[in-house]
C-alpha cells in the first residue's frame, strides 16, 4: 500500500508542515478569553458580549482551557518561549501569567488598548496595537514585542495530531510488512478504504495513472492531516477543541505546499499554456499580454482560494455553534424563563450542527485534496 519511499516523503511533509506552521502560527492574534458566558455578566452587570465570547473560543491561546469553577479558570499551561534584546532567551510556563492577569520577568500579555511604538524606515514613529500578544517592559519603561516562538494551543494540538497520524500510518505499514498477504484487520480495515478512495477517486482521475504515484504521499498526508484535525476540533476537551484548520496560518502553509509542488513539477507544456496559450488569438497576447496576465493571476489565485476556503468553512462552523449558545444568554437578559425556553432550541441546533460538522470535516479534507490533485494534473499534463 505505502512504500518505504512514500513513508519517507510523508514524514518529510509532516516535518515541514509542523516547522512552518509553528513559525507562522506561534504568535496568537488574540489571547483566548477563558470565561463562561455567565461570567460576561460581571459585578457591574455589563451586557453579554456575544462577539467576544464567540471569537474568544476560536482564537489561539497561551494555555489550554479545561473548565471553570466559579470565577476560577482551570487550564493546562503551555511553554512560553520568547527572546528579548535585553533579557535574552526566556522559557517558562504560561501559568506564570495567571490567565493574562499578571506579569512575569517583565513580560505580560497585552490587554485591549496597549500599543507599542514602531519606527519605520523614514524614521517616523507610529503606534501598533498588540492586544493578546506577549509584550516586554524594557528598562526604559517602554513596551516592546519580543521574538515569540511559544507553544500555543494550536501548536500543541498540531503536535498531537502529527504524532497521532504518524502512529496510525506506522502501525498500518508495519502490519502490512509483517503480514502482506493477510486480509486487513483492526486499524488496517479502517484506513485501507480511505487510502484507496484517495488513490482511486482523487489521485488517478485527476493526475493520471502515469504520474499519480509521485503525488500520492502528499495527497494522503494532506487529506488525513485536514480530516483528523477537523475531527479533533469538534471534541470539546483536550487534546481536542483547538481550531487548527480554522487558523489561517496553517491553511496558508498547506496551500503554499500545493503551490510549491505545482510550480516545481510544472512541465514545459504547463508553462507554455500560461505564457503563450495555444489557440488564443494573437491580439490577446500582443501588444498587451492580456491572457498571460490572467493566467499568471490564476497561478497565485488558486492557492489563495484553497487557503481561504478551508479556513472560512471550519471557522464558520465553530462560530455558528457558539452563536446558538450565545442566544441562550442574550434572551436570558430579557427574561430568565425566555432564556430557558430558547436553550432547548439552541441545544437542539448545536447537536444538529455537530453532526453536520462531522460531514463537513470529511468534505473539506476531500475538497482540498481534490483541488490539489487537479492542479498537479494540470502541471504534468502532456501536450496534445
Image (spheres, rainbow, N blue to C red):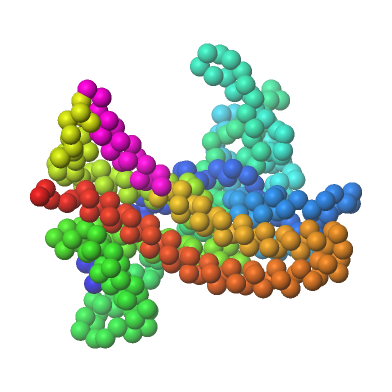
Is residue 133 on the magenta stretch? no
Q: Position of residue 238 (x, y in %)?
A: 59, 65
User: Which span of residues is magenta-colored?
Assistant: 287-305
Find the residue positioned furthest to the right.
44
Q: Nearer the viewer, residue 132 or 270?
A: 270
- Tell me: 272 left or right of 320: left
Against 220, residue 29 (above or below) is: above
Give me the residue at 64% from left, 51% from top: 55
Q: Position of residue 156 (x, y in %)?
A: 52, 56
Q: Nearer the viewer, residue 192 or 104?
A: 192
Find the residue positioned furthest to the left.
384
**The N terminus lies in which quarter of the figure?**
bottom left
Give me the residue at 52% from left, 45% from top: 26
Q: Main secondary structure of the magenta part?
A: helix
Quadrant position of residue 172: bottom left
- Tell me: 331 left or right of 236: right
Against 191, residue 15 (above or below) is: above
Give me the residue at 40% from left, 44% from top: 304
Give me the residue at 64% from left, 68% from top: 350
Q: Is residue 163 visible?
A: no
Amino acid at each position: 500500500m505505502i512504500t518505504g519511499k512514500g513513508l519517507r516523503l510523508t514524514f518529510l511533509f509532516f516535518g515541514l508542515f509542523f516547522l512552518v506552521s509553528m513559525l507562522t502560527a506561534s504568535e496568537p492574534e488574540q489571547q483566548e478569553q477563558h470565561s463562561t458566558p455567565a461570567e460576561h455578566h460581571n459585578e457591574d452587570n455589563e451586557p453579554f458580549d456575544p462577539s467576544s465570547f464567540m471569537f474568544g473560543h476560536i482564537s489561539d491561546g497561551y494555555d489550554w482551557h479545561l473548565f471553570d469553577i466559579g470565577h476560577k479558570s482551570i487550564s493546562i499551561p503551555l511553554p512560553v518561549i520568547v527572546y528579548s534584546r535585553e533579557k535574552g532567551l526566556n522559557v517558562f510556563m504560561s501559568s506564570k501569567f495567571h490567565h493574562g492577569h499578571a506579569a512575569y520577568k517583565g513580560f505580560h500579555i497585552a490587554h485591549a488598548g496597549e500599543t507599542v511604538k514602531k519606527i519605520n524606515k523614514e524614521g517616523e514613529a507610529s503606534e501598533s496595537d498588540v492586544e493578546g500578544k506577549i509584550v516586554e517592559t524594557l528598562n526604559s519603561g517602554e513596551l516592546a514585542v519580543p521574538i515569540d516562538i511559544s507553544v500555543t494551543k494550536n501548536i500543541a494540538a498540531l503536535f498531537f495530531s502529527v504524532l497521532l497520524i504518524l502512529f496510525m500510518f506506522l502501525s498500518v505499514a508495519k502490519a502490512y510488512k509483517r503480514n502482506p498477504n493477510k486480509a486487513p484487520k483492526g486499524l488496517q480495515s479502517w484506513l485501507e478504504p480511505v487510502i484507496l478512495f484517495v488513490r482511486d477517486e482523487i489521485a488517478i482521475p485527476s493526475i493520471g495513472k502515469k504520474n499519480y504515484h509521485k503525488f500520492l504521499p502528499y495527497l494522503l498526508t494532506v487529506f488525513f492531516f485536514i480530516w483528523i484535525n477537523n475531527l479533533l476540533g469538534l471534541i470539546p476537551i483536550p487534546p481536542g477543541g483547538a481550531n487548527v484548520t480554522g487558523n489561517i496560518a496553517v491553511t496558508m502553509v498547506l496551500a503554499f505546499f500545493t503551490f510549491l509542488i505545482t510550480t516545481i513539477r510544472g512541465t514545459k507544456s504547463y508553462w507554455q499554456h500560461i505564457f503563450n496559450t495555444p489557440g488564443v488569438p494573437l491580439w490577446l497576447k500582443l501588444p498587451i499580454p492580456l491572457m498571460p496576465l490572467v493566467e499568471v493571476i490564476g497561478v497565485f489565485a488558486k492557492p489563495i482560494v484553497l487557503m481561504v476556503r478551508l479556513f472560512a468553512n471550519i471557522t464558520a462552523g465553530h462560530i455558528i455553534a457558539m452563536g446558538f449558545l450565545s442566544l441562550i444568554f442574550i434572551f436570558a437578559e430579557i427574561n430568565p424563563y425566555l432564556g430557558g425556553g430558547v436553550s432547548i432550541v439552541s441545544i437542539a441546533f448545536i447537536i444538529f450542527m455537530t453532526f453536520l460538522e462531522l460531514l463537513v470535516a470529511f468534505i473539506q479534507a476531500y475538497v482540498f485534496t481534490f483541488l490539489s490533485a487537479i492542479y498537479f494534473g494540470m502541471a504534468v499534463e502532456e501536450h496534445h
